């Protein structure tokens, strides 16, 4: 070993990942080649981009390409590129650690102690780039030289915990990865990857769209077959033949009808390192003042970091096929951050990173157009492919809803795409349009109730009268729904009305007028009792009143029209660290036995301690019914125990 050789440990999680790779039962091991080719193609993109400002870099390397060379005797396969290459430091940081978002997710799962089986499943979902080489090789070397530098580096590892790095020399910049292949074992997915037919099949299958030639070099003993295809047909005493395996046309430059689902699916996987099919594929071609093409995908699964700032949104930006930016944040609005894909502009000035106002305008215009396209596409799916749309909604609906408050311009397109749970059907989600089509005669408003979960909302006392009278209520059980209804106050001229706030007026005008009168009379008669209760619960409640929204429950809590719902208040408290609670309104059911008994007691003896206990317990039960926490559970419990013992002490017979 030379003096420059270092032996380094893999990061703990990397090591674990490698162990999994080495011993994996994952059957499609051939994807390792796709991963290496994809890395090589990225490295070529980067070189091409740097060469825009440093042309000498490109001149040094000749035609940009990816070369595959197999040696059946030595059982090696080499994947080489003349791309950007890596410096020694880059080699150590890029290859020794897990950085990519997909693998970051894996790392988190490892930390959380996920089973190997679960991890393998995730690997299946994301692919793990370079590490997948160890599924088929028991030793891997990387020889690489950063374009513009003179010293190359040599990396070696058997994947068993350590690797070495040494200085080396390499004629051309770029990277050469040599896999020392395990013995072929087709049963466990290890084909003979030195076999040209195997190689060319795998390349065709996964990497046909790659925009650089993928050249297979093969050594021919005298008079080899396939002479007509070879670039150097004079094979007198063994020579090297080169054959381009891929068709190379960027997939987004082809007419959409010529692109099969398999092709676009492969491109999606190339782009995202996911293993699944995209759930929607959208081709966009714009002509006119601003010429560009875009190929967009809605994945079939949401990444786990969709709601963290860690997630890496953005489309790849190309200009005439040259990669300009890995992730341009300007091409999509935040709420569509789950959409993946590329945009290729006809004439974008290449110094885009300098943020010229002119380019910003162009990007803004593209963003508007793409947003509209995506929303139209979603609407078409919602209309014609319900299953597909539901998959989208389940995965991304939460993020999507953010658009209602942020994208005012497209609100008219966004709102009809929203889906909600509803009292109408426990199994199916409903759109606002469908809700409206089911509204009862005379119904003016769209009713909803926010809450923690369907179960809590469904059993909430607030709904009782609505259920009894057959009014449909939307169940808004997603935390972001609270913010949604702040922005979405009406749909097609009908107000959205929380059944947990303000007064309710149900039924025909005459009927509800009658009910209102009755309630007024009852309230006047019970005024003193209501005041008494108010005094007992004053810390939490700003008003105590009678209601006809309840049929079975004795009490519930409601807000004033402009109050926050308890869920929103909880959300805000989490955000701000415990701000003062707002007081709400305690509503009592005058037809309930408890109210009748309390009224009797109150008339007989205002000092009866059971009255005070009942007031507190009513408040507690109203809180529990809506899924809120009790302000003082210990006290509640004591009150309950006291009341129980008095009630058991009194002989019922
Ligand atoms: P990913 O490609 O998803 O980032 P990998 O583990 O496959 O994950 O690669 C890690 C990093 O190593 C890459 O991001 C890149 O910076 C670097 N790398 C891998 N292969 C090459 C290559 N052929 N040329 C230059 N850099 C490479």
Image (tube, rainbow, N blue to C red):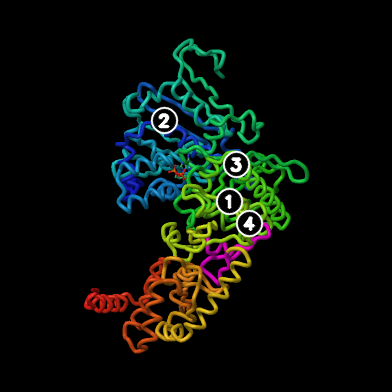
Number of residues whose C-alpha sits closer than 10 Å to that of mark 4, classed few (under 14), some (14–19) or many (20 or more): few
Disc number at residue 381? 3
> Residue visible at 59% across and 33% down?
63
> Residue visible at 23% across and 73% down?
653
Q: Is 497 part of what is drawn in magenta? A: yes
- Front-lying residue, 459 or 571: 459
Residue mark closest to the camera, 4 vs 3: 4
Q: Are marks 4 and 1 in contact (CB under 8 Å)?
A: no
* Residue position marked by numbered label 2 in the rendering: 30
Disc number at residue 441? 4
> Residue visible at 42% across and 43% down?
153
* Residue position marked by numbered label 1 in the rendering: 431
Side of 420 relative to 597 (left or right):
right
* Residue occupying the far top of the picture: 223
Q: Earlier in the sequence, mark 2 or mark 3?
A: 2
- Front-lying residue, 638 or 109: 638
Alpha-carbon distance for marks 4 and 1?
Answer: 19 Å
Name the element at disc 1. Answer: loop
């Amino acid at each position: 070993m030379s003096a420059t050789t270092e032996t380094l440990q893999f990061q703990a999680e990397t090591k674990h990942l490698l162990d999994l790779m080495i011993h994996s039962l994952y059957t499609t091991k051939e994807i390792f080649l796709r991963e290496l080719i994809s890395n090589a193609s990225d490295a070529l993109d980067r070189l091409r981009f740097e060469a825009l400002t440093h042309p000498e870099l490109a001149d040094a390397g000749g035609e940009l390409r990816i070369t595959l060379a197999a040696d059946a005797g030595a059982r090696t396969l080499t994947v080489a590129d003349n791309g950007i290459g890596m410096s020694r430091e880059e080699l150590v940081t890029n290859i020794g650690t897990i950085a990519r978002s997909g693998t970051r997710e894996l790392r988190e799962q490892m930390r959380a102690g996920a089973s190997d089986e679960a991890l393998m499943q995730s690997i299946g979902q994301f692919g793990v780039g370079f590490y997948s080489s160890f599924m088929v090789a028991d030793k891997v070397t990387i020889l690489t030289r950063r374009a513009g530098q003179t010293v190359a580096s040599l990396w070696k590892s058997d994947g068993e915990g350590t690797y070495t790095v040494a200085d080396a020399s390499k004629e051309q910049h770029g990277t050469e990865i040599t896999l020392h292949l395990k013995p072929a074992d087709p049963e466990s997915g290890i084909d003979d990857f030195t076999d040209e037919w195997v190689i060319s099949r795998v390349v065709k299958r996964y990497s046909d769209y790659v925009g650089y030639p993928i050249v297979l070099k093969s050594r021919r003993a005298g008079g080899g077959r396939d002479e007509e295809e070879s670039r150097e047909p004079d094979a007198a005493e063994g020579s090297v033949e080169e054959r381009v395996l891929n068709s190379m046309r960027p997939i987004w430059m082809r007419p959409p009808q010529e692109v099969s689902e398999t092709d676009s699916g492969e491109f999606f996987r190339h782009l995202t390192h996911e293993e699944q099919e995209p759930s929607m594929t959208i081709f966009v071609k714009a002509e006119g003042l601003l010429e560009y093409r875009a190929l967009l995908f809605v994945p079939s699964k949401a990444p786990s970091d969709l709601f963290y700032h860690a997630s890496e949104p953005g489309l790849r930006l190309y200009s005439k096929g040259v990669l300009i930016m890995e992730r341009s944040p300007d091409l999509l609005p935040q709420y569509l951050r789950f959409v993946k894909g590329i945009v290729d502009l006809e004439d974008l000035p290449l110094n885009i990173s300098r943020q010229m106002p002119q380019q910003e305008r162009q990007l803004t215009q593209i963003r508007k157009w793409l947003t509209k396209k995506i929303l139209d596409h979603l609407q078409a799916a919602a209309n014609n492919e319900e299953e597909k749309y539901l998959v989208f909604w389940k995965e991304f609906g939460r993020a999507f809803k953010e658009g209602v408050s942020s994208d005012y311009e497209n609100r008219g397109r966004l709102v009809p795409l929203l889906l909600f749970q509803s009292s109408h059907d426990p199994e199916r989600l409903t759109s606002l349009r469908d809700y409206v089509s089911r509204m009862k005669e005379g119904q003016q408003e769209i009713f909803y109730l926010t809450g923690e979960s369907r179960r809590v909302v469904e059993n909430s006392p607030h709904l009782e009268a609505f259920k009894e009278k057959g009014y449909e209520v939307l169940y808004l059980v997603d935390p972001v729904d609270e913010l949604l209804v702040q922005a979405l106050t009406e749909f097609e001229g009908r107000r959205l009305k929380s059944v947990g706030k303000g007064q309710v007026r149900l039924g025909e005008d005459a009927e509800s007028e009658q009910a209102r009168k009755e309630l007024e009379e009852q309230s006047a008669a019970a005024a003193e009792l209501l005041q008494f209760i108010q005094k007992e619960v004053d810390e939490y409640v700003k008003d105590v009143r009678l209601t006809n929204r309840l049929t079975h429950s004795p009490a519930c809590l409601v807000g004033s029209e402009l109050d926050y719902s308890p869920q929103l208040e909880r959300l805000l408290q989490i955000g701000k660290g415990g701000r003062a609670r707002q007081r709400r309104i305690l509503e009592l059911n005058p037809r309930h036995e408890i109210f009748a008994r309390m009224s009797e007691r109150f008339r007989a003896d205002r000092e009866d301690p059971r009255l005070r206990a009942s007031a507190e317990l009513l408040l507690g039960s109203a809180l529990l019914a809506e899924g809120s926490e009790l302000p003082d559970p210990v006290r509640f419990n004591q009150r309950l125990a006291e009341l129980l013992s008095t009630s058991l002490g009194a002989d019922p017979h």
